[in-house]
Amino acid sequence: MRDRHETNSSPAARRGTKRRLAMAGMALVLALAGCRSTALSVAELGLSDMTVEASHEYPIHGIDVAKYQGDIDWNAARQGGVAFAFLKATEGGDRLDDRFHENWREARAAGVPRGAYHFWYHCRPGIEQARWFIDNVPREKGALPPVIDVEWTPFSPTCTKRPPREDLIREVMAMSDALERQYGQRPILYVPIDVHRERLVAAFPRHEFWVRAVADHPDNVYEDRKFRFWQYTATGSVPGIRGEVDRNAFAGSRADWAKWLQARMRR
């Protein structure tokens, strides 16, 4: 069915149509500019690129949690020095962490900057995993960038696959691109030593990395890799959480953290 305005073909009407189209185009450009990814480089942010020999020498520390931590007193955690938290949200294309929405709400209410992470499943396309994450994680002002957690899964009852380097990079990038379009921030990649060494050395140069090294400094076990977060223990303790919890350091000074947080938290 034709639009009823198609029959109005006077010069004045055509000029009005052109003006409206021009204004609509400008609005689209401004909207796209407003949604530009905040994945700035260290140079653009002016961070110090601080390096230290031990995790405790970094001043900013946080946690990552899943349903296994049970009830969390987020106010106690914040008062005990938790400066940020990454919360497990999804896994593969059909699993949602039982505590995600509760932790998402309560961490924000307590004033703890938090982001959501997705546990990668090697037997499902990246775009499908992206859709599942997007279906379950709100696009919300004040959230940290999403995280894609890429690990080998030798004990999985359904998928122990270890894809070739090019396949893994392609599929993780597909998910990353979809999440960046949705949330306006380039995802952080969490990658343990073995996956990095076997598949991802020199890959994803434009992404920030969150690395795991509990027995040594990341620089000694990750080849040619800058990192933004360092998971330095799985047996940490913080007020407000019963039992052990992963502890993480932000790789920078307090001033670096303030700059990074301002740039990374969605407007």
Image: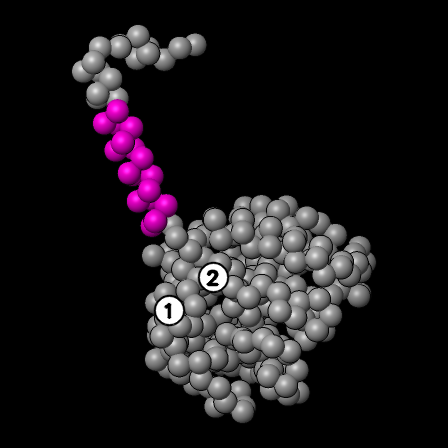
In this view, the mark in front (2 or 1)? 1
**Residue 224 appearing in the image:** yes
| Alpha carbon distance from label 2 to label 1 | 17 Å
- Its colouring scheme is one colour
Answer with the quarter of the image where residue 218 lies.
Answer: bottom right
Q: Is residue 21 magenta?
A: yes
Residue furthest out toward the front: 11
Crowding at dot 2, Cα within 10 Å, few <14 / some 14-19 / many 20+, comes out as many
Residue at the limit of the structure toward the left, as seen here: 12
Q: Is any atom of residue 109 visible in this view? A: no
Q: Which of these two is toward me, 91 or 181?
A: 181
Question: Compared to 239, does 100 lie above or below?
Answer: above
> Which residue is found at the position 27% from the left and 31% from the top?
22
Observer-nearest residue: 219 or 134? 219
Name the image quarter holding residue 70.
bottom right
154 part of magenta stretch: no
Residue 193 placement (x, y as % from top left): 68, 75
Q: Which mark is residue 44?
A: 1
User: Which mark is first along the chain, 1 or 2?
Assistant: 1
In the rendered image, residue 181, in percent from the top left (x then y), is placed at 48, 49
Task: Please give left or right for residue 73 compared with residue 133 in the image.
Answer: left
Quadrant housing residue 212:
bottom right
Q: Which residue, given by chain and number where applicable, does mark 2 sit on?
A: 145
Residue range in magenta is 18-34
What residue is at 22 percent from the left and 10 percent from the top? Answer: 10
The spot of residue 205 in percent (x, y) is: 55, 66
User: Quadrant of the image for the N terminus?
Assistant: top left
The amino acid marked with disc number 1 is Glu
Tag 1: Cα neighbours inside 10 Å, few (<14), some, or many (≥20)? few
Q: Which residue is at 68% across, 48% downward? A: 125
Overall secondary structure of the magenta stretch?
A: helix
